[in-house]
Amino acid sequence: MTFKRLSEYFHILENTTARNQMTEILADLFKEAKSGEIGKIVFLLQGRVAPLYDAVEFGLADKMVIRAIADSLKADGGEVTKAFKGSGDLGITVEKLKGNCKTKKDLSVGEVFEILSQTAKAGGAGSQETKIQLLGKLIVDLDPLSTRYLVRIPVAKLRLGFSDMTILDALSWMRTGSKELRPEIEKAYNVRPDLGFIAETVKNSGEKSFENIEPRVGIPVLMARAERMGSGEEIIEKIGRCAVEPKFDGFRLQGHKKGDKVKLISRNLEDVTAMYPDIVAGIREQVKAKEAILEGEAVAYNPQTGEYLPFQETVQRKRKYNIEAKAKEIPLKLFAFELLYKEGRNLLLSVYEERRKELEKIIEKGEVILVAQEEVVDRAKRLEVIFQDAVSRGLEGVMAKKLDGIYRAGSRDFNWIKYKRSYAGKLNDTVDSVVMGYDFGQGKRTAFGIGDFLIGVYDEKQEKYVSIAKIGTGLTDREWKEIKKRSDRLKTKVKPKNYEVDKIMDCDIWIEPEIVVEIRADEITRSPVHTAGRIMGPSKSGSAVEVKEAGLALRFPRLEKFRDDKKPTDATTLSELWKMLQRQMKK
Ligand code: ATP
């Protein structure tokens, strides 16, 4: 397929908002693509040249792209900058400049992909010039519409408005003309979240199933998540005899070991190996397997007293500089609780008891890696005692695990149940929300330039962010400054396409969905001005649209912490919020 043809699809997709329509257009594109090509196309659709978990970034700022445009089209840099300021879009700027220039070559998707990969991978001295030249060469070769989409890729502005999930739907549609294969494809994706690989596999698998794709050491497995429950009785009723472990308040790590090589992956699939040399050494020494994938919670402790430290201290280890010194000052321990893979054996489909047995076998006693203690219980009373004990030791609560549950990569279900200590309020769990925008400050906070900020949750059905609260109090000065600083890096000119916000809640500044904050609130209430779960319909006279059912909102929301380990799509979802509301009503 030529890149020109792909750009025609980009163009149609850019002008489509309905998700079902997008799915069908993508399915047509995937049908038209050859195998060997489709994997590259799905990356390009996301504005990337590698899977999301691979930290391949272009390292091209707007200014450099402006230079690539000016140099390659022999235009004046000042003029290009002026045109860019006017339209706010480098894509439109280059397309107009190219005007009716001839396309030099009909480059294929593969050729453009290759040059973009080289652009992203160029490093070291002189690499900026190399990047500018490579991009410039493509600008010269391609037709105007293609250049529009080409330059949006390295500056991360392609934004066609759909997620990986729509691509999975479209892959199913390509094969069957419906979404029937989506669950199966999604299962494969959860084990190997490499969309390129998945697209090629679905395209080429013929009648074969791709459900049992195996994990591979070095490639993250999407982490399993827990459902919530509020008493030992409920838990025993739901899953019967189960293993109960402490719920540690640190951060989750997935460790991949191959020989002496160890890689650490965070909850949002970031490669964090360099940040935690102590855990890397611990896995190297204590995990007695050539190949293994394990998971655990890393918690900091005081080396003098041996006491475990609260999350606020543990999180200080997440840093890019001064790593070794901090590792000595605040060492970590990893409480291992899962084994997903061992010596060529996929354990995802093995039951919990089996995985746990294997985990205990491969971890040698030592200082850094400890197997999380567990107790198998069948009585609610005993579960309550363990829970109370955990809480009295300052832990968050307990995790109950179904003995015959498999490891469901990327899913949240009752194979794991979290039972956290209740707080004073009615709502016994926090809500991970996405910051959508902010308003300028008034009064005392004029100095900060931020008076409040809007938060929302992810509505996975619509693939949109819907609002649940505006927060204007309760933050420390430092937190206000922090949220402003982070937000300003993500400013957008207009409200993002995937935000659904009532006019009344409009913000002075809109930002890209990226910052995830953990919010504690007294309860979930209903509000006509928030769009989470809100239903609109025609008014009685039929001449206007009005609120038929109020949305969900948070009462007295407070910022608990920044959740840098979560992607915005990992934030609390709308359906989880409904479940939390139901639980709250039962209390
Ligand atoms: P979630 O991961 O469910 O989206 P979250 O990140 O907000 O939610 P919690 O709701 O606090 O986290 O609970 C799940 C997390 O608890 C796991 O991701 C893991 O980091 C942590 N955890 C602590 N102890 C355990 C344990 N024994 N078994 C599994 N997870 C544990």
Image: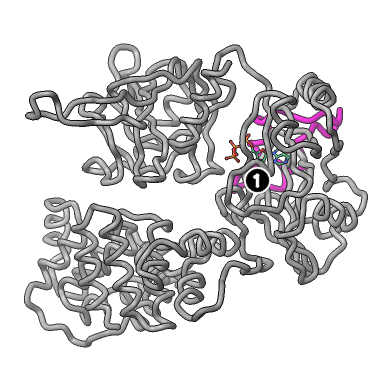
Q: How many marks?
A: 1
In front here: 552 or 586? 586
Q: Is residue 426 magenta?
A: no
Identity, as a three-letter code, of the amino acid under mark 1: Asn
Q: Is residue 367 above or below residue 109?
A: above
Give the position of the C terminus as an image quadrant.
top right
Residue 240 visible somewhere in the drawing: yes
Q: Residue at x 65, y 45 (%)?
A: 322
Q: Residue at x 31, y 23 (%)?
A: 550
Q: Is residue 128 left or right of 213 when viewed as pictured?
A: left
Question: Dot 1 lies on which element?
Answer: loop
Q: Is residue 391 above or below residue 283?
A: above
Q: Is residue 210 left or right of 553 when viewed as pictured?
A: right
Q: Residue at x 17, y 57 (%)?
A: 81
x, y (%) of residue 113? 37, 77
| Quarter of the rendered image showing ligand 1 | top right
x, y (%) of residue 41? 37, 73
Q: Is residue 4 left or right of 576 when viewed as pictured?
A: left
Q: Is residue 320 magenta?
A: yes
Q: Is residue 151 left or right of 279 when viewed as pictured?
A: left
The residue carrying mark 1 is 322
> Magenta segment, which residues?
300-329
Farthest-out residue, right? 365
Give the position of the N terminus as an image quadrant.
bottom left
In front here: 538 or 508? 538
Residue 59 visible somewhere in the drawing: no
x, y (%) of residue 319? 60, 44
Q: Is residue 116 above or below residue 526?
A: below
In front here: 41 or 34? 34
For the residue with label 1, is its CB less than 8 Å from the closest atom of ligand 1? no
Q: Is residue 510 above or below residue 90?
A: above
Mark 1 Cα within 10 Å, few/some/many (few <14, many 20+)? few
